[in-house]
Image (cartoon, grey):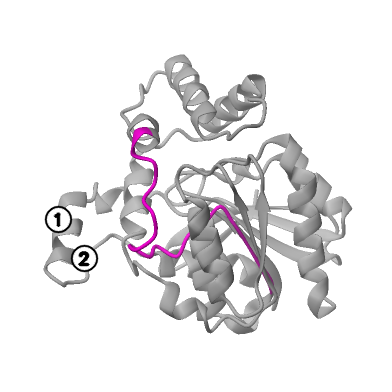
Amino acid sequence: MPKTNVNNIEIEYETIGDPVSKPLLLIAGLGSQMLAWSDEMCEILANRGFFVIRFDNRDVGLSTKLEDAGIPDMMEISAAYTRGEIPKVPYTLEDMADDAISVLNALNIDKAHICGASMGGIIAQILAYRHPSRLLSLTVIMSTTGNPELPPSKSEILMQFFAPVPSEREAYIEEMVKRDSLINGTFPYDEDRSREYRTSEYDRSYYPQGIARQLAAMAVPGNIKPYIAAISAPTVVIHGTEDPFNLIEAGKEIASTIPGAELMLVDGMGHSFPREVIPNIVNALVANSNKNGN
């Protein structure tokens, strides 16, 4: 697969569909490789008229691993905020938004439809207000502004999902399959589909250290709510009613803050993409992309 190189950071990316179709850049969430955007979903999007671009964020998949940066001290990051200081982190979500722009540059794409999920949705929002001239439309899925006044994630789910994971292949896969069931929402849980995804993810690049640095990046800039009111691109916010990580209020806040944004609530959806929700998500993305005629 091709790579783009900016400031000694290589970003692995892949394209699906006809290059003359509408460019759509997909941004994955915390610790997720480009595989989080399934082949099935990408093919559907390509068949609906998009030139689909998916990529590995830095520190995951086949993109550059910043091993020399070490593992961040999350307690010190929290303490810095308590002292009113900006914490020192290996890199920021702004840097990751610029990585996404580097992928567009590598493909000679001036403007694209941007879609991000979870942490990728935060990166997408940052990209939208940092690089407004590069957007045709914005789709934000199961994400947040990082506003500390929002209801917190469900603590019992956080504790189970982010507990230490075994590193041995089979044990890791089975444990992650169990954890995926916790965030599935009320849709029937497809255990075989989860196992296939987690197996592909492990075999392609098992690298848990990167998740810690991405998590630290989410501490900066913190609350982006004051900035997203400047976003002018057509925007749709898609959020599950059963999301245990970013509760429904997070999606509502994004939609109410970005001028003219549409909110689509998906009944029963958690913090994942069950097959049942993909057609509705694709339809919403297509409709939003058509608002500016590009």
In the image, is 193 to the left or to the right of 228?
right
Instruction: Let me know if residue 143 is in the magenta part.
Output: yes
Residue 174 locus on image (x, y percent): 49, 17
Residue at mark 1: 76
- Position of 195 with respect to 158 (left or right) is right
Q: Quadrant of the C terminus?
A: bottom right
The alpha-carbon separation of the residues under discs 2 and 1 comes to 8 Å
Residue positioned 35% across, 21% down in the render = 166
Q: Residue 266: percent from the left, percent from the top?
A: 67, 48
Q: Amino acid at mark 1?
A: Glu
Magenta stretch? 137-156
Q: Residue beneath label 2, please?
A: 87
Question: Do residues under tags 2 and 1 come within 8 Å of each other at their CB atoms?
Answer: yes
Q: Estimate how packed mark 2 is, as few (under 14), some (14 to 19) or many (20 or more) residues with alpha carbons within 10 Å.
A: many
Residue 165's place in the image compared with 183, above or below, is above
Comparing 270 with 112, the one in front is 270
- Asked if residue 216 can be seen in this view, the reply is yes
Q: Secondary structure at mark 2?
A: loop
